[in-house]
């Protein structure tokens, strides 16, 4: 069980395939350029998975050194590093969720629970959620709401507000998102947001396939 994606389980070949097919914003498109040639150079360094590659790109000094060894451009490696690091950025702070009651936030903080990662492992089963509800003197429905928030916020770039849209739609778990049709997922989230007016930004239809692909990288630990 892991809240975050285990980078050791993503091979360099799989990562290349993901980059080739992944929806990207303009600043990321450099990762699709000469992708086969670039990844051949990476593999020549005997790097087998994403965890190993992340370690080679951990600091600016390491990027400079890696660039000299592989002749890969520093700019390319810097963008590649940001992409890899995005797999570990989903530890959302509990205080940033405006939908969580202030009293519940204080109870969670008193237990040393400050992020969605801290909370996630405590809410994996119905029995665990009941025990947690009894411990904090809150309802089981409130705990289930927290569990669903933690679940969907494991996905990359899902903000607290966007996570609330997801759990108020019919796509309130990673398992359901895995099975979703991109256009139906988009329609469902837009409909939910139009009704509840939670997320102020524009929902990008191109992001739906990204979410579905990302969901397949996560383990299915929680029983809702």
Image (tube, helix red, strand yellow):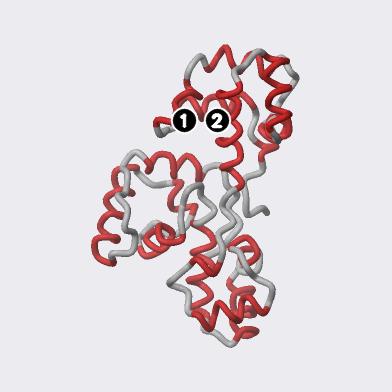
Side of 152 where 81 appears, left or right: right
Give the residue at x 36% y 59%.
170
> Badge 1 is on which residue?
28
Specify few, some or many for label 2: CA neighbours under 10 Å numbering under 14, 14-19, or 20 or more. some
SS assignment at label 1:
helix
Cα separation between marks 2 and 1: 7 Å
> Badge 2 is on which residue?
79
Q: Quadrant of the N terminus?
A: bottom right
Q: Quadrant of residue 83?
A: top right
Give the residue at x 44% y 59%.
163
SS assignment at label 2:
helix
Side of 169 where 61 appears, left or right: right
Extreme residue toward the bottom, this view: 137
Specify few, some or many for label 1: CA neighbours under 10 Å numbering under 14, 14-19, or 20 or more. some
Q: Give above or below for 214 relative to 57.
A: below
Side of 13 where 189 appears, left or right: left
Q: Give above or below for 132 relative to 119.
A: below
Q: Give above or below for 120 relative to 33.
A: below
Give the residue at x 69% y 23%.
64
Give the residue at x 73% y 34%.
55
Q: Give whichever of discs 2 and 1 has the lower sequence position.
A: 1
Q: Are marks 2 and 1 in contact (CB under 8 Å)?
A: yes
Front residue of this view, candidates 88 and 26? 26
Q: Quadrant of residue 106?
A: bottom right
């Amino acid at each position: 069980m892991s809240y975050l994606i285990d980078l050791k389980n993503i091979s360099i070949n799989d990562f290349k395939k993901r980059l080739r097919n992944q929806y990207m914003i303009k600043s990321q498109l450099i990762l699709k350029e000469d992708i086969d040639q670039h990844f051949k150079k990476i593999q020549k360094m005997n790097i087998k998975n994403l965890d190993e590659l992340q370690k080679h790109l951990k600091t600016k000094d390491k990027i400079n050194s890696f660039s000299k060894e592989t002749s890969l451009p520093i700019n390319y490696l810097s963008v590649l590093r940001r992409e890899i690091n995005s797999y570990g950025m989903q530890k959302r702070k509990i205080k940033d969720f405006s939908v969580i009651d202030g009293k519940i936030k204080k109870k969670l903080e008193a237990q040393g629970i400050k992020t969605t990662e801290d909370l996630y492992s405590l809410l994996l089963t119905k029995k665990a959620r009941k025990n947690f509800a009894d411990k904090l003197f809150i309802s089981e429905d409130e705990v289930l709401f927290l569990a669903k928030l933690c679940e969907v916020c494991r996905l990359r770039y899902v903000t607290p507000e966007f996570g609330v849209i997801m759990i108020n739609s019919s796509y309130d778990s990673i398992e359901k998102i895995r099975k979703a049709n991109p256009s139906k997922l988009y329609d469902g989230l837009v409909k939910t947001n139009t009704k509840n007016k939670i997320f102020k930004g524009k929902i990008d239809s191109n992001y739906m396939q990204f979410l579905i692909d990302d969901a397949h990288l996560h383990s299915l630990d929680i029983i809702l």
